Structure formats: structure tokens, C-alpha cells
Image (spheres, rainbow, N blue to C red):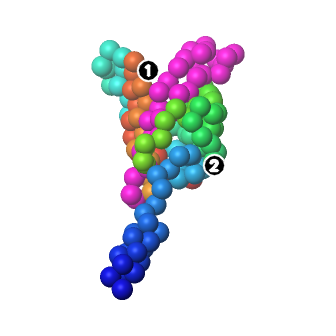
Amino acid sequence: MKHAIILIMILTFAACTSKPATNTDPIAGYWSGKVDGIGDTEQENAPREVGILIIAGCTVNKVCGKYSEDGHCPGDIVLMKVDGNRFSFLSETASGSRQACGSGDIRTIDLELLSDGTIDFLYHNGASLSGILERK
């Protein structure tokens, strides 16, 4: 009887334990919001509107969506790492985009899914942008 109770407890615990995310399912969708910027020389930049489209089921080293700032400078995002509720991406501005976008500009984008359903956003490539994004 004692062994049966222990076995039931182990099975219950195993059933209640969720597996950590290994793909983009928890953050799939379109996210946007205003973010604040700090330039690479530590000067404060004007806020920007960012948008990120993330496809479901995408795994590490795959193109998982698009990223843009103020509706410009679109670029593919590649999932580099998943660590719990944290997702790291690389983004490269599309070739042939307008001069201001810096064609081929590489960005690191870190997203953390927060308990309230929003995303903490951090972008860096010398300059940085940070803020909260909401699912639209």
C-alpha cells in the first residue's frame, strides 16, 4: 500500500510538471509597442514603435518571423536560444532597404514572456532599445 501511494505521488508530480519551451509557441503572434532607445554613445534617442511577427512552432537556427522599427527596416529574425520564458533572436535588415536602415545591420533581440502576457523587449547592436510589447 505504501508503495502504491508513493507511485501515485510520483505520477501526479510528473503529470503536473510542464516541459520547458523549445520553440516559439508561447510567444507566437504579432507583438508591438513603443520602446525607448539609448544610442551607442549613451545619448537618449526618441521612442520608436517596434513590431515583431513570430510564427508558431519555430525552432533554434530557423527564420521565425519579421522585425521592424516605425514600420520600416523589415528584417527576418532567427531564433538563437530558448531559456525558459526567454527567447533570443538575431535580426538582419533586408538588403536593398532604404539607406537609413543600414542594409545588413545585425541586431540581437531578447524577448521575455512576462506573467501578465506581455513581452519584455531588449534590442542591442551598439545602441539599445527596451520596452514592453503587447500581443495585437
Looking at the rendered structure, the kind of residue marked 1 is Asn
Q: Position of residue 44 (x, y in %)?
A: 33, 25
Q: Position of residue 94 (x, y in %)?
A: 65, 22
Query: Could you tell me if residue 72 is visible in this image?
Result: no
Identify the residue at image location x=47%, y=27%: 108
In this picture, is 34 found above or below 10?
Answer: above
In the rendered structure, does residue 33 fall within the stretch colored magenta? no
Q: Position of residue 135 (x, y in %)?
A: 53, 52
Q: Which residues are magenta?
A: 87-116
In this picture, is 87 found above or below 9?
Answer: above
Q: Nearer the viewer, residue 132 or 80?
A: 80
Whole-number angstrom distance, CA of label 2 to CA of label 1: 26 Å
Packing grade of label 1 (10 A; few <14, some 14-19, many >=20) is few
List the residue tagged with mark 1.
Answer: 125
Q: Nearer the viewer, residue 26 or 131?
A: 26
Identify the residue at image location x=60%, y=40%: 59
- Residue 61 in which image quadrant: top right
In this picture, is 26 found above or below 45?
Answer: below
Identify the residue at image location x=43%, y=42%: 83
Labels 2 and 1 touching (C-beta < 8 A): no
Q: Position of residue 96 (x, y in %)?
A: 69, 16
Where does the N terminus fall, quadrant-wise? bottom left
List the residue tagged with mark 2.
Answer: 56
Count of residue discs: 2
Q: Which mark is residue 32?
A: none
